[in-house]
Image (cartoon, helix red, strand yellow):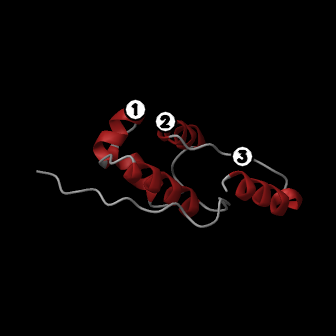
């Protein structure tokens, strides 16, 4: 019998500036949905190893697979010019209040 899945909190910053930061979002969404890694991998159409690599910040996961997993788990990515990052973050925070 599988143990209880403890939800990981979303990262404090919405900025994804590394493979590790992206992986933290993926893990958080998976665990908040109470999905074991094997169930999430099946749902996303990827191997358990690929999903594990993605969650652990491996740079070997292709962008197409990473985006497919993100989409399936409900993660939206937003690209903004770095110069507009502070305003974008402020707008996102205002929307979530």
Residue 58 is at least partly visible in this image: no
Q: Nearer the viewer, mark 3 or mark 1?
A: 3
Q: In front: 52, or 93?
A: 93
* CA distance for labels 3 and 1: 23 Å
Residue 85 seen from this side: yes
Q: Which mark is residue 64?
A: none
Furthest toward the right, the residue is 83
Residue at 41%, 47% in the rendered image: 50
Q: Earlier in the sequence, mark 2 or mark 3?
A: 2
Q: Earlier in the sequence, mark 3 or mark 1?
A: 1
List x then y, in percent, for residue 54.
47, 53
Indicate which disc residue 72 carries: 2
Q: Do the CB atoms of the residues marked 2 and 1 lie less than 8 Å apart? A: yes
Q: What residue did someone put label 3 on? A: 78
Q: Could you tell which of marks 2 and 1 lies nearer the N-terminus?
A: 1
Where residue 79 sits in the image (x, y, percent)? 76, 47
* Residue for point 40% across, 52% down: 32
- Left or right: 80 as drawn, with respect to 68: right
Name the residue located 40 percent from the left edge and 32 percent from the top edge.
45
């Amino acid at each position: 019998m599988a143990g209880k899945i403890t939800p990981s909190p979303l990262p404090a910053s919405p900025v994804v500036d590394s493979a590790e930061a992206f992986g933290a979002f993926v893990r958080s969404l998976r665990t908040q949905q109470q999905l074991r890694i094997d169930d999430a991998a099946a749902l996303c159409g990827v191997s358990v190893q690929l999903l594990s690599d993605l969650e652990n910040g491996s740079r070997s996961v292709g962008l197409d697979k990473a985006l497919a997993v993100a989409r399936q788990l409900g993660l939206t990515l937003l690209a903004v010019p770095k110069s507009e990052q502070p305003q974008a973050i402020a707008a996102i925070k205002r929307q979530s209040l």
